[in-house]
Image (cartoon, rainbow, N blue to C red):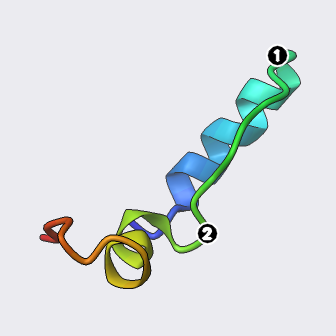
Amino acid sequence: RSGVRSADVIRTLKQHGFKKLWNLDGGINRWAKEVDTSLPTY
């Protein structure tokens, strides 16, 4: 949940030609803490 796996996926998708990609720095847990506090964390 820290964004490491999604960063790996982003790299792979870029290698296959995808261009408009975003990765959450810090993952969904950071997003829930700093952006959307209503989002549950586990």
**Mark 2 nearby-residue class (10 Å; few <14, some 14–19, many ≥20):** some
- Residue 34 rendering spot, x and y as whole percentages: 42, 83
- Residue 37 rendering spot, x and y as whole percentages: 25, 77
Residue 2 against residue 18 in the figure, above or below: below
Q: How many marks?
A: 2
Residue ID for mark 1? 16
Q: Secondary structure at mark 1?
A: loop
Q: Which mark is residue 26?
A: none
Q: Which mark is residue 25?
A: 2
Determine the residue positioned at 42% across, 70% down: 31
Q: Is residue 41 left or right of residue 31?
A: left
Residue 30 against residue 19 in the figure, above or below: below
Q: Quadrant of the C terminus?
A: bottom left
Determine the residue positioned at 57% across, 60% down: 24
Q: Tag 1: residue type?
A: His
Determine the residue positioned at 42% across, 75% down: 35
